[in-house]
Image (cartoon, helix red, strand yellow):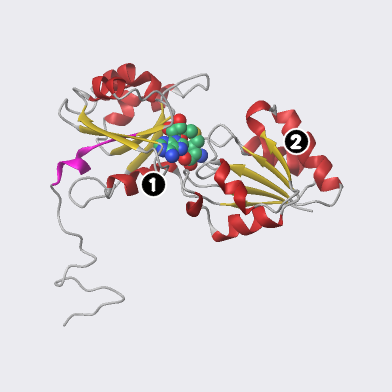
Amino acid sequence: MKVYFIGAGPGDPELITIKGARIIEEAQVIIYAGSLVNPAVLQYAREGTEIHNSATMTLEEVLKVTLEAVEDGKTVARIHTGDPSIYGAIQEQMDALDEHGVQYEVIPGVSSFVAAAAALKQEYTLPGVTQTVILTRMEGRTPVPEKESIASLAGHQATMCIFLSVGMIDSLVKELRQGYPADTPVMVVQKASWPDEVIVRGTLEDIAQRVVKAGIGKTAMIVVGDIFRGEYEKSKLYDAGFTHEYRVGR
Ligand code: SAH
């Protein structure tokens, strides 16, 4: 009689948490974001589970299905792609459940920005390069506050992971160029962790052409920054001359 918001992970059905998979198995009603969630995660569901694809539903319809199920004493698994806290539109659902006095829990997931790092075999926070990761997007139908413009965020020259924007790569690159030098590396990972994952590598100068040439128009993570230059300082954590709580000097 509870609602679980579950992060399904970026695509690979093995990248859902054990807890998320267990709750999918236990749920009587599943509502999944079919536009991005890999239907393969539904393999964890029991036969006969009621399954809805929210891609064709409004918020009201999702809430109606959820509330009716809860009223019938059922457990609902609401499955979002990646981690639901990032562009997941779960706040409005949680707030509506609060209004109705319905209990819920959130099970985190592997967000696509970390799945992209795994695909690229790249650390985002390198000593001597940057210690900051910015998650953002270009403005689409959802507005982005003016003080978070890509140009102003680019000024930090941190690692930037840009969601929901590959379709606007030309204007994105123009904005990024206002903060990063033209030779800054840019990686584009389409469908990270899916069998048809594609990686396109370039710089701010040529990435837009490369992305168009590769035919990448959606479901891609754009990662920008000096971390890809291959120059950094070794970490202090494993430095033999550096002691800490778990390793004293020898
Ligand atoms: N909550 C999700 C993000 C939803 S917004 C998460 O945590 O990942 C949808 C955007 O996420 C897409 O436009 C794309 O930028 C990114 N995305 C989602 N899955 C992806 C994947 N497997 N590979 C690359 N980018 C992905």
Q: Is residue 99 magenta?
A: no
Q: Are marks 2 and 1 in contact (CB under 8 Å)?
A: no
Q: Residue at x 37, y 25 (%)?
A: 166
Percent x, y for residue 107? 59, 53
Image quarter in which the C terminus is found: bottom left
Percent x, y for residue 70? 81, 47
Q: Which mark is residue 63?
A: 2
Which secondary structure lies at badge 2? helix
What whole-number distance in Å separates the C-alpha atoms at marks 2 and 1?
30 Å
Give, as a single range, the part of the protein colored magenta: 222-230
Q: Which mark is residue 245?
A: none
Residue 208 lies, with reference to residue 31, above or below; the image says above
- The amino acid type, in three-letter code, at marker 2 is Leu
Camera-nearest residue between 76 and 90: 76
Classed neighbour count for the residue bearing mark 1: other residues with Cα under 10 Å, few (<14), some (14–19), many (≥20)? some
- The amino acid type, in three-letter code, at marker 1 is Val
Is 160 on the left-hand or right-hand side of 193? left
Percent x, y for residue 234? 16, 58
Which sits earlier in the primary sequence, circle 2 or circle 1? 2
Which secondary structure lies at badge 1? helix
Give the residue pinned by disc 1: 114
How many marks do you count on the picture? 2
Percent x, y for residue 201? 23, 33
